[in-house]
Amino acid sequence: MGKNKSYLYLAVIIVLIVGLSGCTSRQQADGAKLNSITIGVQPSTHQVAEMIAMDKGWWQDTFSKYGITKTEDKLFPSGPPEMQAMLGGELDIAYVGAAPAISAISKGLDAKIVAAVQISGSALVLKPELADNYKGPKDLIGKKIATFPSGSIQDSVLKHWLKQNNIDPDKDLRIVAMGPGDAITAIEAGNIDGTFLPAPSPSKIELDKKGKMVELSGTMWPDHACCVIVVSGKLIREYPDMVKEIINTHIKATEYIYSDTDDAKKICAKKIKLSEEVIDYSLEHWDGAWITDPNEITDSVLSFAKVQYDLGYIEKMPKQEDLFDMSFYNQIQSVPQ
């Protein structure tokens, strides 16, 4: 009996040691001090709010009060690789198209959309000789068109629009995946027939006289959602006050675009290394608008999810609550500013 008690005591001690060590390791993991923030962004006028907040030091001001000592942003050519980086733990926040966010969240990304950034704002550009004779989508049959990779806003809008016009995007023309730099180079070298890209890339091609805009994305899919802010689940759960500050900074930067557009253009031109002439021309000829309220885009985002489901990009239809956490934005708006 004494021997059995000894074994029992030993077993209890082992369980306690294992339990305590597990608890300690979890506490260390969960309590690890967050000292840096990385934001994903793309070289587009769509996401100029992020660039303004970085240029003005507003992001650093936002995060420093939480003990963050390093704030940086990373530039990505399009949404899909940006979301791959976030899936890999490289980003805390992403300014990104709603469509790649849907794909990533559906594949297990621990994150939510917390604010809107912008609507519409892309354009179909064809080589000048094709643009001069363009009458509608049927003229794209047999052509080679470059756009962002599968699962992006541009890929989704283009394929949805083609299917609505009884054109099979997989059989009736060739759609190739390219980032903005490669697509501009390809059409200007005559290697493709057209591009479907976000601003300001269509304006760069048009100003270089290598192509002409023939369709704006807002006519292909009226008032479609485009860019959003995606925030990691870790920040949402562990730093809810910081998430509110992120949204407040985004609202401030978005308002600045409208209040000092000339300075916003300069900041954008510097960030994405294009001339102010291109940025200015782009904003004169795009159909986009900068917004912040996620409540304005929920229906459109769910429509994107349906398109992605139909295209086979995601395995099941997400619900609004799977994609969005609008509680932060709604709390901000309910408090007098």
Image (tube, rainbow, N blue to C red):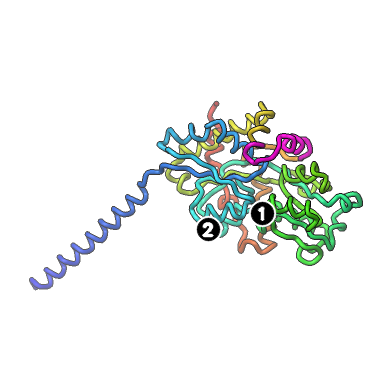
| Left-right relation of 210 to 51 | right
Q: Nearer the viewer, residue 119 or 192?
A: 192
Q: Position of residue 66 (x, y in %)?
A: 42, 36
Res 36 → quadrant: top left
Q: Main secondary structure of the magenta part?
A: helix
Quarter of the rendering occupied by the C terminus: top right
Disc with the residue nearer the chain's start (1 vs 2): 2
- Residue under numbered circle 1: 152
- Residue range (magenta): 269-286
Q: Which label is found at residue 108?
A: 2
Is any atom of residue 303 visible in this view?
no
Q: Quadrant of residue 308?
A: bottom right
Q: Amino acid at mark 1?
A: Ser
Q: Is residue 132 magenta?
A: no
Considering every residue shown, the one lying at the far right of the view is 133
Tag 2: amino acid? Gly
Image mark count? 2
The residue tagged with tag 1: helix, strand or loop? loop
- Crowding around mark 1 (Cα neighbors within 10 Å: few <14, some 14 to 19, many 20+) is many
The reply, left or right, for residue 334 in relation to residue 19 is right
Label 1 vs label 2: CA separation? 17 Å
Horizontal side of residue 293 vs 61, given as left or right: right
Q: Is residue 164 above or below residue 300?
A: below
Residue drawn at the location 79% of the way across and 60% of the way down? 144
One can see residue 198 in this view: yes
Disc 1 and disc 2 in contact, CB within 8 angstroms? no
Q: Is residue 225 above or below residue 261?
A: below
Query: At which x and y percent is residue 158?
Result: 75, 54
Quadrant the N terminus occupies: bottom left
